Image: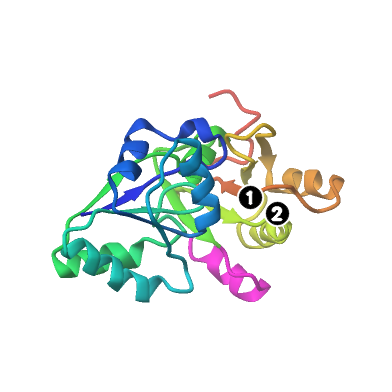
Amino acid sequence: MIELVATPIGNLEDLSPRARAAFEAADVVACEDTRRTGRLLSLSGIKTRMVAYHEHNERQMAATLVRWAAEGQRVAVATDGGTPGVSDPGFTLVRAAARAGVAVSMVPGPVAFVMAAVLSGLPVHGITFRGFAPKKGGPRRRFIEVDAASPHTLVFYESPYRVGKLIEDAIAVLGDRPAAFARELTKLHEEVVRGRLSELAAVLEGRGGQLVGECCLVIAGAEVPADWFEAET
């Protein structure tokens, strides 16, 4: 059995009882950073063996984890925070397990893009999660263009060092749409800033062009009116 176990994205109290039980019952915990996950497990008094499972060894370790599970071991999978498989290792493992006929389950929990979308104040009846955009300008703009006509709210992950560039390119491609950026979700300095993309850019400029903490950028779909935050619903 392989279990993907969601872990806190900031507030350690978000580790669920089911997640603790999954880690305790596992024969091995596969995680991105054994030091980070080790601290989380230690706080719960859990001493399960850990192995590294990250983007650089994902394909090789997926085969190993599937083999261990096929041999009868319980394998718990965790990332540095959030839900495995969502812009983090996990997809390759689930696919490999499915092909091998190995049972896979999940202990659900925190996922940053859902929280950011809900707190943005934008429509959430349809969401397109885009993950991380390319680092370079040209590919990044083409990445954004794919959803230019989509009616769905768009959600991106971005580092604090490049979120300003992402906003600039979004304005160039999509126009000055209603949007929000969320950072430090579930943490002490959690923040959600709402307004048009140009207003978010101005906030960033006022802070020296950079934020602290991982960011989610949420952008309105093509059919949302420009005065979304000002108009009465």
Q: Along the line of sight, which residue is nearer the eye, 123 or 129?
A: 129
The residue at the point 66 percent across, 73 percent down is: 136
Which region shows up in magenta? 133-148
Q: Residue furthest top?
A: 232
Q: Position of residue 104 (x, y in %)?
A: 22, 54
In the rendered image, the vertical position of residue 151 relative to residue 232, given as above or below: below
Q: Is residue 14 left or right of residue 140?
A: left
In three-dimensional space, the C-alpha distance between marks 2 and 1, rounded to whole angstroms, equals 6 Å
Scheme of image coloration: rainbow
Mark 2: few/some/many CA within 10 Å (<14, 14-19, 20+): some
Q: Are marks 2 and 1 in contact (CB under 8 Å)?
A: yes
SS label for mark 1:
loop
Residue type at mark 1? Glu
The residue at the point 37 percent across, 37 percent down is: 20
Q: For mark 2, what is the residue?
A: 160
Mark 1: few/some/many CA within 10 Å (<14, 14-19, 20+): some
SS label for mark 2:
loop
Q: Which mark is residue 214?
A: 1
Q: Position of residue 163 (x, y in %)?
A: 69, 56
Q: Position of residue 146 (x, y in %)?
A: 49, 65
Count of numbered marks: 2
